Amino acid sequence: MTQTAQVELTDARRAYRLLAAWWEGNARDLPWRFGRTTPWGILVSEVMSQQTQMSRVVPYWVEWMRAWPTPEALAAASGAEVITAWGRLGYPRRALRLQACAKTVVEEYGGKLPQDYETLLTLPGVGDYTASAVVSFAYGKRIAVIDTNIRRVLGRVFAGKESRGGAASADERTLAQRALPEDDAESVVWNQSVMELGATVCAAKSPACEECPLNGICAFLAAGRPGLGERRTRPRQRFKGTDRQVRGLILAALRELPPGGSLPISRLDSLWPDQAQLGACLASLDEDGLVEIHQGGSVSLPE
């Protein structure tokens, strides 16, 4: 039986009611939720949360929004300020893409974040998930938001099987659309609560089924949780010894400099024993616009 057929046989309205009640009492009190920030603040939270745990994001988001609460403020910041504020969130190119997004919003949309999915997709660093999340969570419009957690929950509850990870399949997108409530406000609660359930209860390897509000209607649980843990929706990534680690060490050293400061490249030699890897990582940071290499052999964060 396909995922599409299965959702038609399942009481999606009952699932919504159960999840909405659960959300009311169990949603994490994150600073960008419950109408406490702007659409821009929601976009910033979504970009920061990509491949990063929410618990790590919160303090960075708070400081970031204190420094740059609007696209105009972020657009006017220096590259060095932006990369320094990004700290250890990881994947620092996201910081520069976020600033590029801010500049586009200022230059092309008068500083107001667009409300429609298609226009949001044209902004630097904004893909399908982020555009959908902004439309739903910032503007309260009906749209299917599809991330790893949502795919896992919907696949288990309605189709009785695990998500394969990777890009969302046509069946998964159809399933998400059919399960989505027709009412705008209900669709927002649905997107938020399904995502929250996947993040906190319906985990990839060790779901807490006894605590799940949907355990009475979950096809996956009823089938004995077939294949649990066989396909991780987000493969564990090795970090130690990788270029990501080396790039992070270089950026950490540069963030310690005073504003406008630079560091002789020779001073970086002590950061990593493999000098070939160190040099390649420095070159890649320069290519990505995350550092500037100056004549005379010094390196700094971009201006």
Image: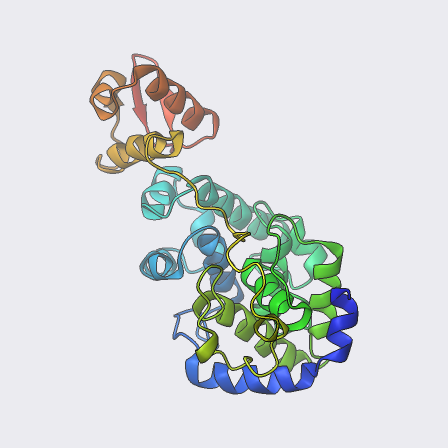
Q: Is residue 89 left or right of residue 72?
A: left
The quarter of the picture where residue 225 lies is bottom right
Tell me which residue sits at (48%, 52%) in the image: 50
Toward the viewer: 175 or 75?
175
Whole-percent x and y of residue 71?
A: 49, 55
Q: Quadrant of the N terminus?
A: bottom right
Tell me which residue sits at (69%, 74%) in the image: 180
| Coloration mode | rainbow
The quarter of the picture where residue 153 lies is bottom right
The answer to whether residue 7 is above or below residue 74 is below
Toward the viewer: 174 or 27?
174
Tell me which residue sits at (71%, 80%) in the image: 10
Whole-percent x and y of residue 170?
A: 75, 56
Q: Tell which residue pokes out farthest to the front in this image.
A: 224
Q: Is residue 288 left or right of residue 267?
A: right
Q: Is residue 183 left or right of residue 233?
A: right
Whole-percent x and y of residue 143?
A: 68, 68
The answer to whether residue 299 is above or below residue 222 is above
Tell me which residue sits at (65%, 49%) in the image: 167
Toward the viewer: 210 or 181?
210
